[in-house]
Image (spheres, rainbow, N blue to C red):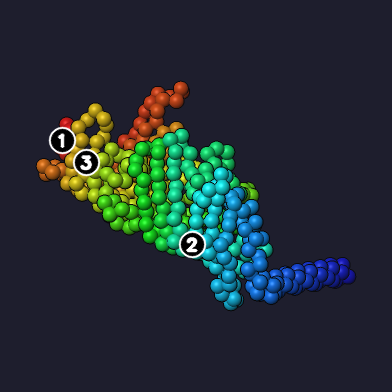
Amino acid sequence: MTAFTSNSYRLTKVAATTARLALWALAVAWAVLIAVWGGLHLLIVPGIAQFRPMLEAQATKAVGATVHIGALSVQSAGLIPAFALKDVVLLDAQGREALRLPSVVVALSPRSLLGLGFEQVYIEGAALEVRRSADGVIRVAGFALPQSGDGSSSGADWLFSQAELVVRHGTVTWTDDLRGAPSLVLSDVDAVLRNRRRSHRMRIDATPPPEWGGRFGLRAVFDQSLLSLHPGRWREWRGVVYADMPQVDVAQLRRYVDVGGGIAQGNGAVRAWVDVAKGRFEAATVDVALAEVNAKVTARLEPVNLRHVTGRLGLRRLNGGMEFSTQGLQFETFDGLKWPGGNVRVAVYPEDGRNAAHGEVQADRLDLAAMAEIAKR
C-alpha cells in the first residue's frame, strides 16, 4: 500500500511539473507574439517609408537579384496591416530592367515576421517574359532557371516559402527558340500560389490568342520531400498537374506542347491529369472530345481523318516498360466507319538484356470488322 501511494505521488508530481512547464511555454509564446504584434503596429506601420532601403536589401538577398522599390506606403493598418509597393523593378546581372511590377501589396502578420516573409503578396498587372533558348535553358524575366542538380535557388526558396502569392490581370509571353515557334502571349493571367509546411498548391487561369480557343486553367498540387530543408527544390516534389481546356485548337497547341498520339488537327475540349515524381513523368490521363481530327499512328501510314472522337486515353510508366490504355473511346470517320467504344490496355516491355521484348494486350467490346477496316488504313 505504501509503495502504491509513493508511485502515485511521483506521477502526480511529474504531471504537475509538466503542466507548469506547458503553461510557462504558452505564456512565453504569447508574450513573444504580443511583442512582435506591438512592434509591428507601433514601430513599423507608422514609419514604413523609412524601411524602404532595408526592404530593398532584404528583397535583393531573398530573390538573388537587385530590387528597387519606387514608393512604399501603408495600404491598411488593420488587424493584419498591408503595405503598397509601387514600381517594383528587378535588374538582371548586367543591370538591365528584367521585370517591372506596377503595383504590389504585401500583408504582414506576426507569423510571417517570425518566418521573415509575408502573409500575402498581391501583384496587379505584371508583365512577365519566359524564354527557352536553343540550348534548352529557360529564363524567367531574364534569369536562368537551374538546369541541373537539385534545381533550388534563393529566389525559389523564398517564393515557395511565402504563405500566399496572388497575381491578377497579368501578361505572360512565352518564346521557345528550341522549337522555333513564334512567341505566345497569354493575357488576363490570374495565378494563386499557396504554400504550407511541405505542400504547394497552384492555380493559373489564362486567355490565349483567339485562334487558340477559349480561356484555360491549370492546377497543381505538390508535396515536397519530408527530409528537404529547401522549399524551392522542385525536383524533389511529387504531385499532380491538371489542365482544363474547354475549347482548344490542337494544331496550335502542338506547336508548343508534345500532345502525342499523332494528332495533327482537332478542335474541342481536352482535360489532362499528369502525375509527376521527382521531376519525372509517371503517368497521364487525357479526356478528349474533338471534332475534325487528323491523326497519324506512324510516319509510314497515311493519316486518318475523323469526324469526331471522344473518350479517355492513358499512359503510365511501368517497371521496365510503358502502358497505353483507352476507356470508352469512340470515333467516326468521314466515310461513316464507327468505332463503338470499349476498353483497351497495351503494355510494352522493351528488351533489357535479360528478357526479349514482349507485351500484353487486354480488351473488351472489340469490333473485329471495324478493326480490320482501320488496319487497312
Label located before the other in sequence (1 or 3):
3
Label located before the other in sequence (2 or 1):
2
Residue for badge 2: 102
* Up-down relation of residue 352 to residue 43 (above or below): above
Q: Quadrant of residue 190?
A: bottom left
> Measured from the top left, where is residue 316 in percent x and y?
40, 41
Residue for badge 1: 373
> Measured from the top left, where is residue 67 in percent x and y?
58, 55
> Measured from the top left, where is residue 229 in percent x and y?
64, 49
Tell me the crowding category of disc 1: few under 14, some 14 to 19, or many 20 or more residues within 10 angstroms, Cα based.
Answer: few
Q: Is residue 128 visible in the rendered structure shown here?
A: yes
Residue for badge 3: 294
Label located before the other in sequence (3 or 2):
2
How far apart, in angstroms, are the residues tagged by discs 3 and 2? 45 Å
- In depth, the one of 251 and 270 nearer the eye is 251
The type of residue carrying mark 2 is Pro
Left/right of residue 297 with respect to residue 19 in the rendered view: left
Q: Residue at x 50, y 50 (%)?
A: 98
Secondary structure, mark 2, is: strand
Where the C terminus falls, by quadrant?
top left
The type of residue carrying mark 1 is Glu
